Image (tube, grey):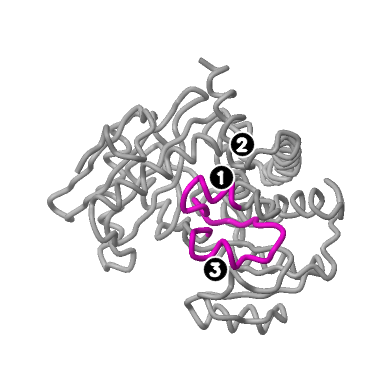
């Protein structure tokens, strides 16, 4: 397994391989860039098919966190970690505690949080033996979590995209009445995004591999259900990928009819070239690492300031301006939006050196 020659290695500051014999822990921490502050990003627990697959994921995700935090204007760098394990394993808490001791050993260079397979209650377990954990359940009132703000940020980002493409709505008002939105992935954040869209008057088309999640959204929000492998091709105005990454790829991109792609999933483009292909097709892409920054913007405050729900909400709503800046500049220069967003992030990181 190569590291320095790995295609996703992007001058990462530090990559740590973690092991614990007692629990069988196998994990990787990737610190990408700390120009703006301590590296921060979630902990993903997933039964990767190989260590190579896990390394690819953590390198790519940690790099995305650097750009996410920079474009969102946070005084934080980028990092990520992955635990190679099934999150349903019965000794999950023991594995998390073992892993948290590795994070603690970094002395605050990296702060961890929730991600796929690691929820807010799990973050509290991590915090039992580690001082550098945010987005914990205990940090928010009942019924509110970092995921709540991730969905709000995705909704705000989509509103900015709709205002840019169709001229509907502005920073303070929504105009989604009658807009058709396809939501792929109905986990906690995907479902919350559906709720916000439904309340704003959007018509929902949804898909998920979990039928119970689909049935719930159909019953509660009057959504239309389609097959998970066809959701990208639905006849809609907006396509919102909210599951795993790589959904905009060589097989799907030619079937997308939506004029706007804006969702929660990380790494939606299977390759950078697909961002240019969206541009050629006249499809506006809201860069995923900005659109899904809401949870980070809300919960990450606790790393450097006192967490307030009201101030967190106001911070997340400022994503409208960040997205508008990216889309406007990309349109003016005729460049893919992801390239412009990354340039903005690079410039901010370079200015901090």
Q: Which residue is mark 3?
A: 185
Q: Which residue is mark 1?
A: 289
What residue appears at the point 55 percent right and 27 percent down from the top-left corner? 346
How would you classify the magenta stretch by its main secondary structure? loop
Nearest to N terminus: mark 2 or mark 1? 1
Answer few, some or many: residues within 10 Å of disc 1's Cα (few below 14, many 20 plus, some between 14 and 19): many
Which of pointers 3 and 2 indicates the residue nearer the eye? 2
Answer few, some or many: residues within 10 Å of disc 3's Cα (few below 14, many 20 plus, some between 14 and 19): many
Disc 2 is placed on an element classified as helix
**155 shown above or below 225:** above
Left or right: residue 308 versus residue 36 is right
Asked if the residue under mark 2 is in contact with the one under mark 3, i.e. CB atoms within 8 Å, the reply is no
What residue appears at the point 32 percent right and 36 percent down from the top-left corner? 104
In the rendered picture of this protein, how many numbered marks are placed on residues?
A: 3
**8 shown above or below 92:** above
Magenta range: 248-277
Q: Residue 49, image x and y in percent?
A: 26, 61
Quarter of image, res 183 = bottom right
Residue in the foreground of this view, choosing between 241 and 86? 241
Disc 1 is placed on an element classified as helix
What residue appears at the point 63 percent right and 35 percent down from the top-left corner? 340
Q: Residue 93, image x and y in percent?
A: 30, 58
Q: How far apart, in angstroms, are the residues tagged by discs 2 and 1?
A: 9 Å
In the orientation shown, which residue stands out farthest toward the front? 280
What residue appears at the point 71 percent right and 78 percent down from the top-left corner? 221
Q: Which residue is mark 2?
A: 341
**190 shown above or below 264:** below
Q: How far apart, in angstroms, are the residues tagged by discs 3 and 2?
A: 25 Å
Q: How far apart, in angstroms, are the residues tagged by discs 1 and 3?
A: 17 Å
């Amino acid at each position: 397994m190569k590291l320095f020659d790995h295609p996703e290695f992007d001058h990462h500051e530090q990559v740590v391989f973690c092991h614990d014999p007692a629990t069988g822990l196998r994990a990787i921490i990737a610190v990408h860039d700390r120009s703006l502050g301590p590296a921060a990003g979630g902990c993903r627990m997933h039964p990767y098919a190989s260590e190579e697959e896990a390394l690819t994921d953590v390198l790519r995700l940690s790099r995305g966190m650097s750009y996410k935090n920079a474009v969102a204007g946070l005084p934080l760098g980028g990092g990520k970690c992955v635990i190679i394990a099934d999150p349903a394993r019965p000794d999950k808490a023991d594995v998390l505690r073992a892993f948290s001791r590795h994070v603690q050993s970094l002395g605050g260079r990296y702060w961890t949080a929730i991600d796929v397979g690691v929820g807010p209650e799990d973050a509290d377990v991590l915090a039992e033996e580690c001082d550098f954990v945010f987005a914990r359940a205990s940090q928010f009132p009942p019924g509110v979590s970092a995921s709540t703000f991730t969905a709000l940020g995705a909704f705000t980002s989509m509103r900015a995209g709709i205002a840019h493409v169709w001229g509907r709505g502005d920073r303070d008002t929504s105009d989604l009445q009658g807009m058709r939105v396809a939501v792929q992935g109905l986990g906690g954040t995907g479902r919350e995004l559906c709720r916000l869209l439904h309340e704003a008057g959007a018509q929902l088309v949804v898909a998920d591999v979990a039928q119970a999640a689909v049935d719930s959204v159909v019953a509660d929000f009057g959504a239309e259900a389609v097959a998970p492998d066809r959701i990208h091709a639905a006849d809609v105005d907006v396509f919102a990928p909210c599951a795993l990454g790589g959904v905009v790829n060589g097989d799907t991109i030619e079937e997308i009819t939506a004029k706007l792609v804006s969702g929660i999933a990380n790494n939606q483009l299977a390759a950078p070239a697909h961002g240019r292909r969206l541009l050629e097709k006249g499809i506006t892409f809201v860069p995923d690492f900005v659109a899904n920054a809401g949870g980070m913007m809300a919960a990450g405050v606790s790393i450097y300031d006192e967490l307030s729900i009201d101030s967190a909400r106001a911070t997340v709503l400022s994503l409208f301006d960040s997205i508008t800046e990216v889309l406007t500049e990309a349109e003016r220069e005729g460049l893919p939006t992801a390239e412009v967003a990354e340039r903005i992030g690079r410039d901010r990181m370079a200015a901090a050196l």
